[in-house]
Image (tube, rainbow, N blue to C red):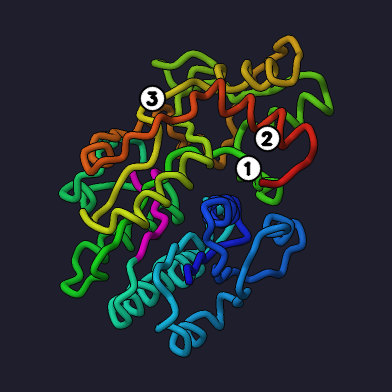
């Protein structure tokens, strides 16, 4: 039995699909299950049970002998709009309890951290444990993820295997429910359908031209492959970057979305909203050497191939994975 928290979300539901495809059917999905647009992500997936996130610890106390692995993907992932207490409760304290249960019951754990922990990247994008305490996230979401990473590294009692994954800019199927927090690819696709064009944020940084803000975009199917690898690897515990190791521009992203839709690019630029302007990352690129050193050698989707698959096989058909 494998537990996936945040199972109805984008990353969690893609992971459930990967597990099902690999022959794992005894899966317990943990989420709040209050939104039909998210629940759609679990359609046509084989699950043993659905457990409300507020009942999960009680359920785990009763069923821990059956559980062989926990993927803790559940979190409040919006970067704005909630008070600190919400992030502390759902991202920090909830995760501490998951960790403590895994220690008590001898269950290996993979949990979602975030590249948001790196802030403006002043310390680079290296997943070395020594830098975790010196990072300065730009929002409460990033702070909550970094606070848990710091706490985890300080624990004398740890699950016999654990990995915290610093996800970079994830895109791909099953993100229809995410609204403003959805990937720029989904926003581009929707804007092109509605208006024939795409508006990207202007640069407010002298070192970057408009549209040349750079991110390490990673296709969600690559995340699932990495987590599946770690489930079998079960050694070399620690915090790992999860990106492609190659930053690409938003202009690249938008241009490739037009191409996948069979349309000529029509891109204009608008000012970055003031509520996020002073907390805007202009460059991210994961150092992936640590994951490669422990034996992960699968090739990543290129941005071109990932967008092509996402647009043609999912967005064009309003399909889930």
| Nearest the eye: 139 or 9 | 9
| Nearest the eye: 160 or 249 | 160
Is residue 114 covered in magenta?
Answer: yes
Secondary structure found at label 3:
loop
Secondary structure found at label 1:
loop
* Residue 283: mark in rendering: none
Residue beneath the point at 55% across and 68% down: 27
Where is residue 145, by image quadrant?
bottom left
Residue beneath the point at 47% across and 85% down: 63
Badge 2 or badge 3: first in the primary sequence: 2
Badge 1 or badge 3: first in the primary sequence: 1
Secondary structure mostly taken by the magenta-highlighted segment of the chain: strand
Q: Residues within 10 Å of mark 3 (few under 14, many from 20)?
A: some
Residue beneath the point at 20% across and 45% down: 128
- Residue 202 location (% of width, % of height): 57, 21
Q: Which residue is mark 1?
A: 182
- Against 320, is 303 above or below? above
Where is residue 207, by image quadrant?
top left
- Residue 13 location (% of width, % of height): 60, 55
Q: Which residue is mark 2?
A: 186
Estimate the spatial distance between the alpha carbons at disc 2 and disc 3, rounded to whole Å: 21 Å
Q: Residues within 10 Å of mark 2 (few under 14, many from 20)?
A: many
Estimate the spatial distance between the alpha carbons at disc 1 and disc 2, rounded to whole Å: 6 Å
Q: Which residue is mark 3?
A: 246
Contact flag, marks 1 and 2 (Cβ < 8 Å)? yes
Residue 244 lies left or right of residue 16; in this view the side is: left
Magenta stretch, residue numbers: 109-118
Residue found at the very far front of the displayed protein: 23
Residue 282 lies left or right of residue 230; in this view the side is: right
């Amino acid at each position: 039995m494998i537990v996936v928290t945040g199972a109805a979300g984008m990353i969690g539901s893609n992971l459930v699909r990967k597990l099902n495809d690999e022959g794992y059917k005894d899966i317990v999905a943990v989420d709040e299950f209050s939104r039909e647009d998210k629940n759609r992500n679990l359609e046509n997936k084989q699950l043993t049970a659905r457990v409300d996130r507020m009942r999960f610890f009680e359920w785990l106390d009763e069923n821990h002998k059956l559980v062989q692995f926990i993927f803790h993907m559940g979190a409040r992932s919006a970067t704005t709009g909630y008070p600190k207490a919400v992030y502390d409760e759902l991202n920090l304290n909830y995760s501490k309890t998951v960790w403590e249960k895994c220690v008590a019951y001898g269950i290996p754990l993979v949990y979602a951290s975030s590249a948001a922990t790196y802030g403006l990247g002043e310390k680079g994008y290296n997943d070395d444990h020594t830098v975790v305490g010196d990072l300065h996230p730009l929002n409460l979401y990033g702070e909550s993820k970094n606070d848990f990473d710091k706490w985890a590294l300080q624990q004398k009692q740890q699950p016999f295997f654990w990995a915290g994954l610093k996800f970079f800019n994830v895109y791909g199927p099953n993100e229809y429910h995410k609204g403003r927090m959805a990937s720029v690819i989904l926003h581009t696709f929707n804007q092109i359908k509605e208006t024939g064009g795409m508006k990207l944020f202007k640069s407010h940084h002298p070192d970057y031209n408009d549209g040349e803000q750079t991110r390490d975009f990673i296709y969600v199917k690559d995340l699932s492959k990495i987590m599946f690898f770690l489930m079998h690897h079960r050694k070399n515990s620690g915090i790992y970057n999860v990106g492609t190791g190659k930053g690409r521009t938003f202009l690249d992203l938008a241009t490739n979305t037009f191409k996948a839709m069979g349309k000529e690019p029509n891109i204009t630029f608008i000012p970055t909203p003031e509520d996020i302007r002073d907390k805007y990352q202009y460059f991210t690129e994961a150092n992936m050497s640590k994951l490669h050193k422990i034996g992960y050698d699968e090739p990543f989707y290129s941005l071109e191939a990932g967008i092509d698959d996402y647009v043609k096989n999912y967005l064009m058909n309003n399909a889930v994975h």
